[in-house]
Amino acid sequence: MIPPLELGWRLLRLPLRRPLPVRGTLCHERMVLRLHLRDASGRQAWSEAAPLPGLHSESMDQLLALLRAEGSSLLRELRGGSVPQQARRPPSLGLALDLLAEGFLPPASPAHFLPVPCAPLLGLEQLHSPEAAGVSHAKLKVDPSSLPVLQDLGSVTGTPVLRLDGNGRLRVEHADALRGSREKGLRLQWIEDPCATWEESLAFSRESGLPLALDEGVEHMDDGELAKRLARPEVAALVLKPSLSGGLAILGKGVTLARQAGKLPVFSSSFESPFGLRQLAWLARRLGLGGPQGLGTAGWFEGTAVRGQAQELWPLCPSLPAGSGEGELLDWGRCRIEPATSRARKRTLAIELSSQGNTLADRERIEQGLSKGQDLFLLNGRLPRERRIELARDLGCSRMATPDGLEELDPPATRPAHGARLWVATGGSSGRSRLVALDAEQLEDAARGINRRLGLDAADRWLLSLPLYHVGGLGILWRCRLAGATLLHMRDGLARSITECEPTVISLVPAQLQQLLEEGHAHALRACRIVLMGGAPLDDGLYRRAMSLGLPLRLSYGLSEATAAVCLSDPAEGRLPDGPGAGRVLPRRELSLDGQQRIQVRGTCVTRHCRVDGRDVDPRDAEGWLDTGDRGVVDAAGRLRVLGRVDQRIQSGGENVQCERVEEVLRGCPGVRQALVVGVPDKRWGQRPVAVIQLAEQALAPKILDHAAVRLASYELPKIWLDWPEDLQEGLKVPRGELRGWVLQQQEAGWPARLFQGE
């Protein structure tokens, strides 16, 4: 059996002690990507990828996108003993993946020093400072303005042997100045790239008597060209930047060519972090490289200093949180593949939660099942028993845990090809049921992103106001776990729970908010630090009313297949010019719009497995994008506004009617508690909108048409108005699919539930 493997990554921002000049620009911080490989037996490996802007062709955003989209396939290749194909490996990531495959583990010594002597990169002002005490070799960048100073250093005792780097800024006529410096006793080992062209650099070497070290552009040379240049008598060394090589094989080939030509191969850093320098030092020692290596850039990072011929490094504590000595955590992620085994996988256990779905008993049953390693399918206790059994059998469950005990089921022979810690059923906004697989890691990653945006911490108290059989409720559970916040359970009714529990954070769907405001509980919501809205777009009228009452609303957009929230608004920016918005994309997610304004999302939080009509489905496309089925627009500030469902837009007489817009207008009419609009077939118009409304008083019905007529176009006005069905099973969301079926039955029966008919 091959044990499971997990590949994790963390993006860190590391502060620099002084600005770093790179190709004419100054960098004040360094971004590094820390990679971690682990298997079930406890074996692990670490590595780092740190592309430097201006030096590497790839960007950090490209590396993160590649890991999110292809992390699992990269992991499978690593598990199989091979390294991922070069076509999918940007140079910096290629070396990091090779080191993972080699099982790189830094020594666990309490003294964190590089295991090889180093030539630190110093400035002229540092050559004789305490920072350079005991340094035998140092690298120094030179330009025409620094040459006169170099001539005076030959007589200064304690000046280290210098390796110069001209970065193409010198000309052949400057060679005499360096010759004079050497004659005055300045010890110079070589110079890298003195002039802009190879021919000029050769001439510079001959005039100055100073050997060359090949550096700039060697990673782009073919073997023949590199061997030809190494054969030149002016060349003394080959300087290799491992992170530009693309991998161990290419790096090893360069070392071999240098040795065959009798030249010294030397590593040079690309300003990796102290941890990254440590892995390069390990690699240099493994390849048997002699002499001081050009890995002395740790002194540019906060908390490090030059110590003799080695660099002191930060402790290797990858498991510590941000702020514990390894920089600021900006992003994270992981992917996991299951073992290849012939052993039968345990069937998923269906758990029937209570009708509320958010009681303490519901939570304890979920946590107990997870603690035993059981995969769980969380069932809505409000569903009819026949429907619960049907869903459980579709998932291949052989047992269903009810409040009365275990119920044996007769599952079908087929079941999902993929396991998951948790499954939830969602009708979504489309009305079509699908079962969505969620890993605990996805819930954790999703929770980290929203916790950071909300500023959730251990002082917060979050009321579990959503059921745990919905991903919105599960998200609350994971967010509180990670932040150490208190999870509050519902008491007798939502309003009483808010008043008595005094939460700092509460999640609501629009129907809950509307009910609380109608019942006069705005004061209780004002006492919260955050009222997080989700589940459906918020009507403009309800949003304005809530904001006028001083409620601390944060609007969100999400879906079950993306592990709840994808976007979240910042405080006081919920309303865009055309209506309430859903804010900006959360960390670890990406959002795009196609030509028809369809919202697509991508990221590690997006599920890879769904079950629809007894079939396994990956809802993502080849590039990892999930089509949400929603329409939206994004403004210049990156804020999303959801326009409605794609399948809730109908064509009536050649005009487009977005049902959600009509519903918003109808809900704004006094006395309307709920309103839904669906399209029905019509021989003359193709489709026509039908409104289903729930009234506080039946006597208010005639006023609705007057209210709508001045706010809607004629083609948007519903032609048939139906009374809300009393037996409709409502939850946090109105079941559109069920309601549409009821409307079609009404049409066939001649509209017996009609309140009135429009013109």
Image (cartoon, helix red, strand yellow):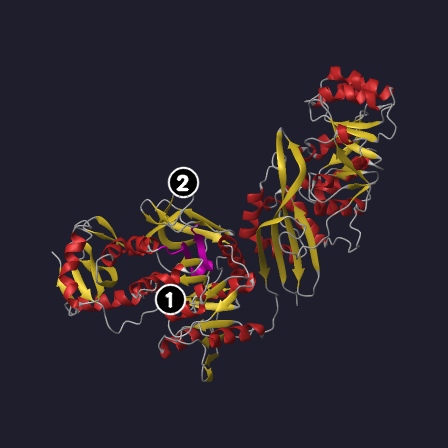
332 or 302: nearer the viewer: 302
Residue position for label 1: 433
Which range is magenta? 550-570
- Quarter holding residue 341: bottom right
At label 2, the amino acid type is: Ala
On screen, residue 392 versus residue 695, left or right, reads right
On screen, residue 754 versus residue 738, left or right, reads left
In the rendered image, the vertical position of residue 326 relative to residue 518, given as above or below: above
Foreground mark, 2 or 1, reads: 2
What element does badge 2 sit on?
A: loop
177 or 385: nearer the viewer: 177
Whether label 2 touches label 1, CB < 8 Å: no
At label 1, the amino acid type is: Ser
In the rendered image, the vertical position of residue 369 relative to residue 24, given as above or below: below
- Quarter holding residue 537: bottom left
Asked whether the viewer can see residue 187, the reply is yes
Query: Residue 39: image x %, image y %?
Result: 66, 62
564 or 211: nearer the viewer: 564
